[in-house]
Image: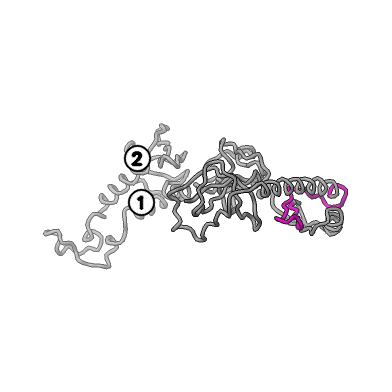
Amino acid sequence: MVVKVYIDEREREQYYRAGELSLDLGSEVVVECAERLRVGKVVGKAPYFPLHKLKQPLKPVMRLATSEDLERLRRMTAREGEARQLAVRLAAGRQGPMKIAYVRSSSDGYKLTVFFTAEERVDFRDLVRDLSHRLRAKIEMKQIGVRDEAAITGAGLGSCGRTLCCKSWLPSFHPVTMKMAKEQKLSLNSTKVTGVCGRLKCCLAYEYPIYSELVRQLPKIGQPVDTLQGPGTVQVQDILGEAVTVVLETGVSLRVTLDEIMQIAAARYHERGGGHPCNKCGDGSGCGNGSGCGNGSCRANSTPPGESYERDQDSGSNE
């Protein structure tokens, strides 16, 4: 049995192997998380978890939590809170702006890792010495990005109303650029495309590949196209609808789908003699019985209607 375990608000819910343990929802268990033993709560069961698709095996549930484990968790949480408050006070009086995000304690409490954000490199050696002296522990400083901070200490909900991807399931961050928003025709208002971390939303990259593929298939804005009502010029692209708005020479606007454009292009291709190889290479032998010219190098055998259409459009032909 595989179970989902909630550890705390700074860690995303993770899956563990229950093994022979009989666990109910709400059971408190001891698991290994971030290279230390933690106490978590079972919040779900996954009897059909696809273990065969995992690149690394799931970690096991160590045991049911005892009263000693819960007391150790209480002391650890209190020590982390005390260390963070002290680190915030000491960091405020030093050069180099830095923001203390959170503090993580080892299982035995003798090592404290302080996570912080800063716009540039910070000399924190004096801070480490002061913290180590006051807390009687080994201090390690780790600089993280604002996205990591949001994933751990953020409000947890995005503008979509769902839990932040970085807080719920996103295993790592990937590059997100303004080009992705532009190609998806999204509003470039900063409040619309930025997340709680102040950076571009990670979800901008999710649908970008399919948008890029659809955009490549559609005629470009300003490109001349043929329609059933006559020639016109593309004014607007409807990417997901796979259609464009065309303004005819008469000034009338109409919506034309990509299928309609390709059908007209294919019909024009055949009208120009592209329907039979012999009409291209000039060899009429075999035309009467429909066997074709048999010339494998004939351009008509390798030129699909789509390419002919694009070539004609590039030259501005509206025949």
One can see residue 174 in this view = no
Q: Is residue 147 above or below residue 235?
A: below
Alpha-carbon distance for marks 2 and 1?
13 Å
Amino acid marked by disc 2: Thr
Q: Quadrant of residue 243?
A: top left
Dot 2 alpha-carbon crowd within 10 angstroms: few under 14, some 14 to 19, many 20 or more? many
- Determine the residue positioned at 59% across, 36% down: 159
The question of residue 109 being in magenta is answered with yes
Between 233 and 99, which is closer to the camera in this rendering?
A: 99
On the picture, is 273 further left or further right than 4? left
On the picture, is 167 further left or further right than 142? left
Pointer 1 residue = 309
Pointer 2 residue = 227
On the picture, is 110 further left or further right than 4? right
The question of residue 311 being in magenta is answered with no
Q: Which residues are magenta?
A: 91-115
Q: Find the residue positioned furthest to the front.
A: 67
